[in-house]
Amino acid sequence: MKQTALSRWLKAVILAVGLCGLGVYFWIVPTLARSVTAQYPEFSGCLWPWLCLVWATAIPCYAALLFCWKIARNIGADRSFCAQNGRLLRWISYLAAGDVALFLLGNVVFLLLNMNHPSILLAALLIFLIGMAISVAAAALSHLVGKAAALQEQSDLTI
């Protein structure tokens, strides 16, 4: 597959993930939250704080998608292994770690404020572990891309 075709496919996937995320964050989650508060009116005071927490977790996700778009653009320009891609992957790693930390911290705060159930906190721990795995994978890719960029620069200077 050529670099430009790969870049187009990556951009299409990034756009699809972004649109699916919009549907989840701004349609599915509020609909489910409203149905829960309709079924259990005692949770109606928790609706807006929870929606704000969920929407706050969307910000790092879309920032990471923006960085992925820049990486896809670099791949299309035949700069797959460049220092900029390594830095962008490192930022994606930081964003993933920060996002899941924010989600876990919000869950703990809501539990202390009696706006959360301990089983939800356990699910948040699972989400935290998955997010940290994504963060570590992005950090490892950042390291490898940085090393590959250094090797490519050395070989370009040799030739």
Image: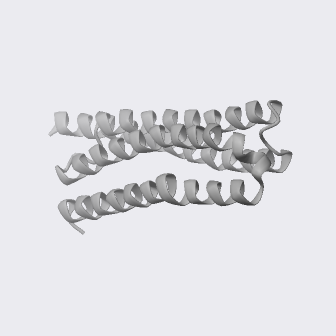
- Report x, y in % for residue 97: 58, 36
Residue 132: which quarter of the image?
A: top right
Q: Nearer the viewer, residue 2 or 45?
A: 45
| Quadrant where the image shows the C terminus | top left
Residue at 82 percent of width and 30 percent of height: 112
- Give the residue drawn at x 70%, y 53%: 37
**107 relative to 65 in the view: left or right:** right
Tell me which residue sits at (41%, 42%) in the image.
64
In percent of width and height, residue 107 lies at 72, 38
Determine whether 5 is above or below 25 in the image: below
Q: Nearer the viewer, residue 106 or 155?
A: 106
Residue that sits furthest to the bottom in the current view = 1
Q: Nearer the viewer, residue 35 or 144?
A: 35
Q: Position of residue 70 (x, y in %)?
A: 27, 43
Residue 104 placement, left or right of 62: right
Residue depicted at 76% across the width and 51% down the height: 41
Residue 42, position as x, y percentages in the image: 79, 47
**Colour pattern of the rendering:** one colour
Residue closer to the observer: 7 or 35: 35
**In the rendered image, which quarter is residue 113 located in?**
top right
Is 10 left, or right, of 74 in this rendering?
right
